Amino acid sequence: MDTPDHLLLVDDDRQLLELLREYLQAAGFRISSAENGAQMRAVLASNRVDLIVLDLMLPGEDGLALCRDLRSRGAAHLPVLMLTARSDEADRVLGLEMGA
């Protein structure tokens, strides 16, 4: 039996995390979640993750800083999908340049 893909959701909005968790679990994914960078790192330290869904607008370290940190630690292979309410084109370009 195949193991479902493991997604890590990183967002400080608990309602959104729960909504995404319910939807993605129903679609057959295994889900972990984190509300900030420290929690994200803890999940990554103890789990193999196939994809990170990362909010850009987090308190403390924002999503761009977390993505930059992931890439500097050798996680270039790990896909990152960025969620954002920002509409600034520069933020989008920066995210793409970091491999998101």
Image: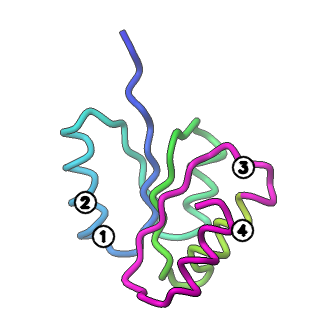
73 left or right, relative to 26: right
User: At 50% from the left edge and 77% from the top edge, which residue is drawn?
Assistant: 56
Which residue matches tag 4?
A: 68
Which residue matches tag 1?
A: 14
Query: Which quadrant of the figure has residue 91?
Result: bottom right
Query: How far apart are the alpha carbons under marks 2 and 3?
Result: 27 Å
Which one is earlier in the sequence, the residue at label 3 or at label 1? 1
Magenta segment boundaries in residue numbering = 71-100
Which one is earlier in the sequence, the residue at label 2 or at label 3? 2
The location of residue 70, given as percent across then percent down, is 70, 58
Query: Which quadrant of the figure has residue 85?
Result: bottom left
Which one is earlier in the sequence, the residue at label 2 or at label 4? 2
Which residue matches tag 3?
A: 76
The location of residue 99, given as percent across then percent down, is 65, 60
Q: Residues within 10 Å of mark 1 (few under 14, many from 20)?
A: few
Give the numbered dot on residue 95: none
Query: Which quadrant of the figure has residue 71?
Result: bottom right
In the rendered view, would you say 5 is above or below 52?
A: above
Q: Amino acid at mark 2?
A: Glu
Mark 4: which secondary structure?
helix
User: At 30% from the left edge and 70% from the top edge, which residue is drawn?
Assistant: 14
Q: Nearer the viewer, mark 2 or mark 4?
A: 4
Magenta stretch containing residue 92, yes or no? yes
Q: Amino acid at mark 1?
A: Arg
In the picture, the quarter occupied by the N terminus is top left
Q: Nearer the viewer, mark 1 or mark 4?
A: 4
23 left or right, relative to 79: left
Mark 3: which secondary structure?
loop
In the picture, the quarter occupied by the C terminus is bottom right
User: At 52% from the left edge and 70% from the top edge, which residue is drawn?
Assistant: 36
